[in-house]
Image (cartoon, helix red, strand yellow):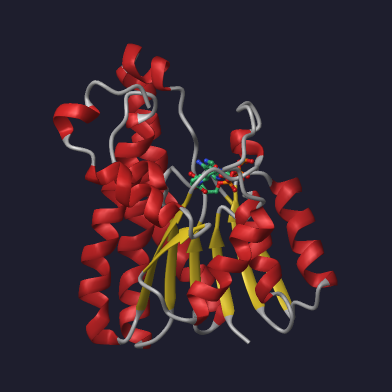
Amino acid sequence: MPNVFILGATSAIAQHVARQFARGSCFVLAGRNGEHLKAVADDLRVRGATNVEVSIADLASTGRHAAMVDEAAQKLGSVDIALIAYGTLPNQAECEASYECANEAIQNNFVSVVSWLTHLAPIFEKQKQGTIAVITSVAGDRGRKSNYLYGASKGGLGIFLQGLRNRLHASSVHVLTIKPGFVDTPMTAHLKKGLLFAKPETVARKIHCAILKKKDVVYVPGLWKPIMWIIRAIPECLFKRMSL
Ligand SMILES: NC(=O)c1ccc[n+]([C@@H]2O[C@H](COP(=O)([O-])OP(=O)(O)OC[C@H]3O[C@@H](n4cnc5c(N)ncnc54)[C@H](OP(=O)(O)O)[C@@H]3O)[C@@H](O)[C@H]2O)c1
């Protein structure tokens, strides 16, 4: 059973992914809300996890990343799966009006994740095995006026992961880029729900499967793969006139 390190373990999607691995596994769960983390840890114990430890920190604050990665590696022995799930959906209009707001979104969704990956990569390289799975977004596939700060952060992260996958392939380390579409979680609580919204448990099952099958990139649900293919194929001269 795998030893799993989850960054952003209170995320609805991450909780459901963790449940898929619960029986017999050891976890280190990192997040900023201690009470919520404890509840997630208790849930995993009830579901058969062998050992669950929690690590409380603002994950966007990079100062303790190196120490937290070392602690997790010590607690787990080998880190078989590292899942980076935390993120925020910034208000696009506020980001357009304020660089501070834009910078915070980029720090949270991109820069701090690069820091985690920089500390995690040598551990996996040394182990010569394991999966680094990172939740990006379909929003990173093409910039749109309605959310290009979030999209740019996730898109930049996607490019970083392509390079990391290329680097770690030689060490037999699996790097998975996860691209969800709309998922019904606290992050999207303020949005009107339509047909394209998926449940976090459905998305989690597909992520679990993609980890086991060692996929490189997974759209969840899979319908988003052709949708984003079409969105990317629209010529820029037309796309810039559209309201998406
Ligand atoms: N829901 C969607 O439609 C959708 C679509 C595409 C991609 N995604 C991505 O999926 C991932 C998981 O999101 P979700 O849908 O599961 O939403 P969620 O339940 O709202 O989870 C987001 C999590 O990120 C945590 N977080 C944010 N900033 C943090 C920080 N600085 N330090 C520690 N924790 C932090 C939040 O913790 P607190 O609860 O303590 O704030 C929360 O647990 C995110 O990366 C998101 O961008 C979601």
**Quadrant in which the N terminus appears:** bottom right
Left/right of residue 165 with respect to residue 221 in the rendered view? left
Taking the view exactly as shown, the residue that stands out farthest to the left is 237
Where is residue 74 shown, x and y percent of the image?
A: 52, 77
Where is residue 208 shown, x and y percent of the image?
A: 57, 72
**Quadrant in which the C terminus appears:** top left
Vertical side of 87 occupied by 168: above or below: below
In this view, the residue in front, 19 or 192, is 192
Left/right of residue 162 with respect to residue 76 in the rendered view? left
Q: Quadrant of ligand 1?
A: top right
In this view, the residue in front, 92 or 143, is 143
Task: Please report the residue visible at 72 percent of the width from the left and 77 percent of the height from the top.
Answer: 51
Task: Please report the residue visible at 81 percent of the width from the left and 63 percent of the height from the top.
Answer: 42
Is residue 73 in sight in this rendering? Answer: no
Where is residue 54 shown, x and y percent of the image?
A: 66, 61
Vertical side of 210 occupied by 140: above or below: above
Left/right of residue 28 with respect to residue 65 in the rendered view? right
Task: Please report the residue visible at 29 percent of the width from the left and 38 percent of the height from the top.
Answer: 152
Vertical side of 30 occupied by 152: above or below: above
Is residue 162 in sight in this rendering? Answer: yes
Vertical side of 196 occupied by 210: above or below: below
